[in-house]
Each structure stands twice: as structure tokens, then as C-alpha cells.
Image (cartoon, rainbow, N blue to C red):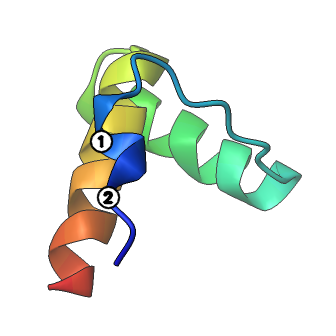
Amino acid sequence: MDEAYLDLEEVELELDEDVLAEIDEKAFADHRDNRDAAVRDLLDEWLKARE
């Protein structure tokens, strides 16, 4: 696995409408409308699923 990206400070993602809807649902339900927290939570779930 190429780990050259690990020293990046920013990453840009393009998300489709379904993913954005899932983020908004999680933000509303679990994070008091905090979209950033919802994105971190979903990213954490995705990374753990890859292990």
C-alpha cells in the first residue's frame, strides 16, 4: 500500500447525493447537526471496516 499520502494536511473528496444524505442524517441524529463530526464518525467506521 502506498503510504505517501499520510503526510498530507488536506484531502479533497467528491461525494454523491446519497453519501451527503447519509452524512446529514448522522449529523442530525448523533451529532446535533455537526456535519464535521458526522464525517469523522463515518470515516472512522469505514476505516475500521477495512481492517
SS state under label 1: helix
Residue 37, quarter of picture: top left
* Amino acid tagged 2: Glu
Task: Say whether residue 6 is left or right of residue 51.
Answer: right
Residue at the (42%, 44%) spot, across then down = 5
Residue 45, quarter of picture: bottom left
Q: Looking at the picture, how far across and down is residue 9, in whole percent?
A: 39, 17
Q: Residue under circle 2?
A: 3
Q: Looking at the picture, how far across and down is residue 6, in whole percent?
A: 30, 41
* Vertical comparison of 23 with 18: above or below: above
Between 6 and 27, the residue placed more toward the observer is 6
* Amino acid tagged 1: Leu
Between 4 and 23, the residue placed more toward the observer is 4
* Vertical comparison of 30 with 35: above or below: below
Q: Looking at the picture, how far across and down is residue 17, in whole percent?
A: 85, 50
Q: Looking at the picture, how far across and down is residue 27, in whole percent?
A: 42, 30
Q: Residues within 10 Å of mark 2 (few under 14, many from 20)?
A: few
Q: Residues within 10 Å of mark 1 (few under 14, many from 20)?
A: few
Between 23 and 14, the residue placed more toward the observer is 14
SS state under label 2: loop
The image quadrant where one finds the C terminus is: bottom left
Residue at the (42%, 36%) spot, across then down = 39
Residue 42: assigned label: none
Residue 6: assigned label: 1
Residue at the (26%, 43%) spot, across then down = 41
The image quadrant where one finds the N terminus is: bottom left
User: What distance separates the C-alpha of mark 2 from that of mark 1?
Assistant: 6 Å
Task: Say whether residue 33 is left or right of residue 21.
Answer: left
Q: Are marks 2 and 1 in contact (CB under 8 Å)?
A: yes
